[in-house]
Amino acid sequence: MKFNNQIMLITYADSMGKNLKELDSVLQKHYQGAVGGVHILPFFPSSADRGFAPVRYDIVDPAFGDWEDIRRLSERYYLMFDFMINHISRQSQYFQDFAAKKDASPYRDMFIRYKEFWPGGEPTQTDIDRIYKRKPRAPYVEVPFADGTSEKVWCTFDDEQIDLNFQSEVTRRYVRDTLRFLAARGAAIIRLDAFAYTAKKRGTKCFFVEPEIWEILSSVQKDLDDSGRMILPEMHEHYTIQLKLAEKGYWVYDFALPMLVLYTLYLHDAAPLKHWLTICPRRQFTTLDTHDGIGVVDVKDLLTDEQVEKTQNCLFEQGAHVKRVYNSELYHNMDIYQINCTYYSALGNNDDAYLLARALQFFAPGVPQVYYVGMLAGENDIALLEKTKQGRDINRHNYTTAEVDTAMQRPVVRRLRSLMRFRNSCPAFDGACTLADTDDHTIEIHRTAHGCEAVLHADLPSRKFVITTRDAQGCETTIDLDND
């Protein structure tokens, strides 16, 4: 199915039921009309990071199903697949061949070797300090070769995720062939995970390096032009970079919205959110929650440093079962720019606050994405967090089909589903987004298209909101979320 302006679910293949078949069954049973697209988080064989260290892309991990399961889903929903454009698994055939044959391997140029990248084979301390990195030291792994030698190879993330060298023809060919394969297998959109790290250049941050990053994106888009598939570059950084991407015609993520909405609901001050809704890209996917944490870096300068700090403090004070320690090294939190918490628990497991947050998201410009835990108004999973000691697992509970059935009995989940169905069926969301001139304790968002209008009016202190619509004949209706 082709991409359309309907809500996209974000889920792992085994998070709403144990595999793709059960996921399909759950969606048909409970979410007809509420979900138009599905971003299936990496479902390929992987050696680490829950799918984000892909060993190969040509098969579905047998634990989840097969390509026939993907095909069936693609007939009912537009699908998004992940392509880890920055890296590949250490266990992949390409890296294993390199480790075995070294310079004799046809894949030797697929990876970034320190001895070739840095003069003298090592970065200076100035080089290391300049790099935008996820590790306290230079980003590398020491690779032992079959001949008994070893050398450093660039590795930004986990030791199983080896960076690719975009200066080489073998990498460009691998990227082109893989993208075209995924496009042919049912992907309407291909998400370029960690794409901002792909361009490495001495004397730079090695992050969103211009103009090289634009050349890579242009090449990727050309690889897919004949297929008609769309790419979605993924990155967490200053909102102005998303604006740059949008200006060049790319769809982007709105990762600023989650913290802005939390600030709005905690402090009852809509001014920063109103400003963002006025200037944000229109061709974007909006989020409140994803498989990662709640982004902080994305909102810098949309909120002042003081406002960001207030929002973080409110999250830990008002959020349900969330502690600062869950975002520390004790729980393997790699990223100081994200906070680990479900969005429902960030709002104190409060139904009214949570539904208002979703209403604000659905009325914002762009196509909404709803993470599976958020779709079920999931609370922080402290048991899983303590079992794995992985901070992000607080927001990665795997639901059995029976647990989904039980969750569907909760009023907040059913009302959210009603809100999702409304967002998908109302034609007003195909058009403009404007804001009424109200005080900062209230917010009124108007969406208009095809002669129709939808209006969200929200009172922040009470967390109450009303949605009204007017059709092309002038008939006005107040939306009742309890009428499911």
Image: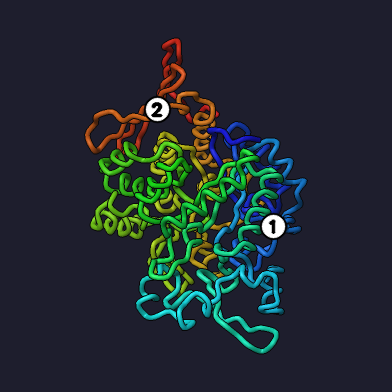
User: Image quadrant for the C terminus?
Assistant: top right
Q: Is residue 406 visible?
A: no
Mark 1 secondary-structure assignment? loop
Q: Residue 266: percent from the left, percent from the top?
A: 30, 48
Is residue 319 or residue 32 the one in the foreground?
32
What type is the residue that disc 1 sits on?
Answer: Tyr
Q: Which of labels 1 and 2 is toward the front?
A: 1
Badge count: 2
The residue beneath circle 1 is 57
Q: Quadrant of the N terminus?
A: top right
Asked whether the viewer can see residue 175, the reply is yes
The relative height of residue 51 versus residue 286 in the rendered view (above or below) is below
In the picture, measured across the screen, residue 274 lies left or right of residue 339, that is left
272 vs 365: above or below: below
Q: Which residue is tagged 2?
A: 432
Q: Position of residue 270 (x, y in %)?
A: 28, 41
Mark 1 or mark 2, earlier in chain = 1
